[in-house]
Amino acid sequence: MRQPFEFSPPRPGLDPGPLRAKAGRPRLGGRGGVGRMAGAVLASMLIAVPGLALGQTAAERLNDFPTAARADYVFACMSTNGTTREMLQKCSCSVDEVAQILSYEEYLEAETVLSMRRVGGERMAVFNSSAAAANLVAELRRAQAEAEIVCF
């Protein structure tokens, strides 16, 4: 029975190429060698870090707010606080801070609850009385308060 990394002389007529091991040294290629292990490690990294396969940076993975959502936030902020260049800067800063605290999905859920609360009626009462809905809105309010402290 052969040992896993035992030196074996090349078979006649086959050129082992650059992977030919010197006497007494383990062979690095072939079945189950370093190449296969490196491929497995690379594949596991691509699975573990999905953005790596798509060429995304860490900032891109964390910054999931679409441009249109950011623009809507800035327009609403400016319509409330004024339409000056200074307010544009402050509102842009504010949406950036909110995006760092909440994922876009969390932001969207909280905004949906707020818009449903404005509709009113019996069918919308669940948005007023639900603890989960209240928590979503509270998280959004906390993020907006932190953004106000940082940006305004």
Image (spheres, helix red, strand yellow):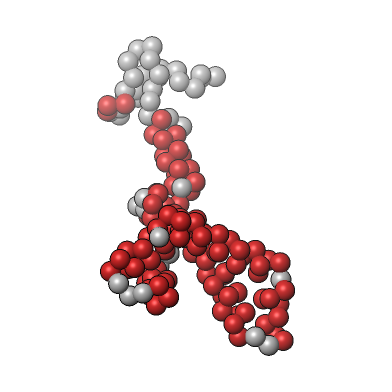
Can residue 13 be seen from the camera position used here? no
Task: State the image coordinates of residue 117 (x, y, percent, origin top left).
Answer: 62, 79
Q: Residue 126 is drawn in which quadrant?
A: bottom right
Left/right placement of residue 106 relative to residue 50 reads right
Q: Residue at x 58, y 75 (%)?
A: 114
Q: Residue 7 is drawn in which quadrant?
A: top left
Q: Residue at x 45, y 20 (%)?
A: 5
Q: Quadrant of the C terminus?
A: bottom left
Task: State the image coordinates of residue 149 (x, y, percent, origin top left).
Answer: 46, 56
- The number of callouts visible is 0
| Foreground pick, 108 / 151 | 151
Name the residue furthest top.
Answer: 24
Left/right placement of residue 137 relative to residue 104 reads right
Q: Relative to 129, is 98 above or below?
A: above
Task: State the image coordinates of residue 113 (x, y, percent, origin top left).
Answer: 60, 74
| Foreground pick, 129 / 21 | 129
Q: Residue at x 38, y 25 (%)?
A: 28
Q: Quadrant of the N terminus?
A: top right
Left/right placement of residue 58 relative to residue 119 reads left
Task: State the image coordinates of residue 82 (x, y, percent, origin top left).
Answer: 36, 74
| Foreground pick, 26 / 92 | 92
Can residue 139 be seen from the camera position used here? yes
Name the residue furthest bottom.
Answer: 121
Q: Residue at x 55, y 64 (%)?
A: 140
| Foreground pick, 16 / 97 | 97
